[in-house]
Amino acid sequence: MTSDDALELFRKTGALLSGHFVLRSGDHSREFFQCALALQEMPIVEQFGKALADRVRAWGATTVVAPAMGGLVIGQEIARQLGIRFVFVEKKEDRLVMRRGFKLSQTDRVLIAEDVVTKGGRVQETIEIVNASPARLVGISVLVDRSGGSLPFNHPLESLIQLRVETFPPDQLPPDLQGQPAVKPGS
């Protein structure tokens, strides 16, 4: 699957939104990838999961770890495609933690899976959780990298879509967004 193929699936499902959006970081953007709209269709989940699994298969992951909520569906599908274990981290008091009895051991080779990254905050928190365990992080897999490949994760990063999407601090909005109400569609 090419980046153009993946973008077309986002457009077809109405998951690529245009307007004035507030991102999790608090920054604003004209574009928003509402991955949940694309990932509600299991044939699309399977296509995305297969494409990402094929790109990272050589990394030899034994466990996929995904931050909830965004990474759950695609993370589980990548793990299914690779035939490996899937676990997730979730928010507790506004920080990601590993709960529910999930543990990582020294034999785990971890692939982090996420739906969308812009500044990479949730992925960075997940990296810290993996690095605090005896497991080894082998790389990161995302559907959409809105940073244009500029995130300093210090681990291999594979994405289906890589774009440089403009974002703006709330006090530095361009004129076209200043008069438009901002929407926080959820992430």
Image: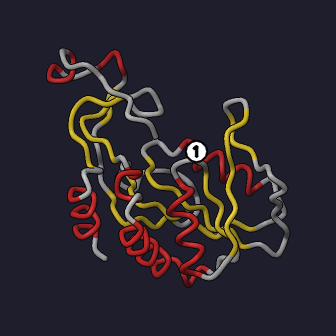
In front of the other: 90 or 54: 90
Which residue position is annotated with label 1? 122
In front of the other: 81 or 23: 81
Could you tell me how many numbered marks the image carries?
Answer: 1
Q: Residues within 10 Å of mark 1 (few under 14, many from 20)?
A: many
Which coloring applies here?
secondary structure
Q: Quadrant of the N terminus?
A: bottom left
In front of the other: 92 or 104: 92
How far across and down, in percent of the image, does residue 74 sit? 50, 63
Q: Residue furthest left?
A: 176
How far across and down, in percent of the image, does residue 76 sit? 58, 66
Task: Identify the residue shown where x is 82% and y is 75%.
Answer: 107
Task: Identify the residue shown where x is 56% and y is 54%.
Answer: 153
Q: State which quadrant residue 58 falls in.
A: bottom right
Image side of residue 98 versus residue 183, left or right: right
How far across and down, in percent of the image, does residue 36 sit? 41, 51
Task: Identify the residue shown where x is 61% and y is 57%.
Answer: 66
Image side of residue 55 versus residue 93, left or right: left
Q: Amino acid at mark 1?
A: Arg
As helix, strand or loop, the secondary structure at mark 1 comes to helix
Q: State which quadrant residue 7 falls in.
A: bottom left
Image height of 179 relative to 125, above or below? above
How far across and down, in percent of the image, does residue 69 sit? 56, 47
Task: Identify the residue shown where x is 26% and y is 49%.
Answer: 16
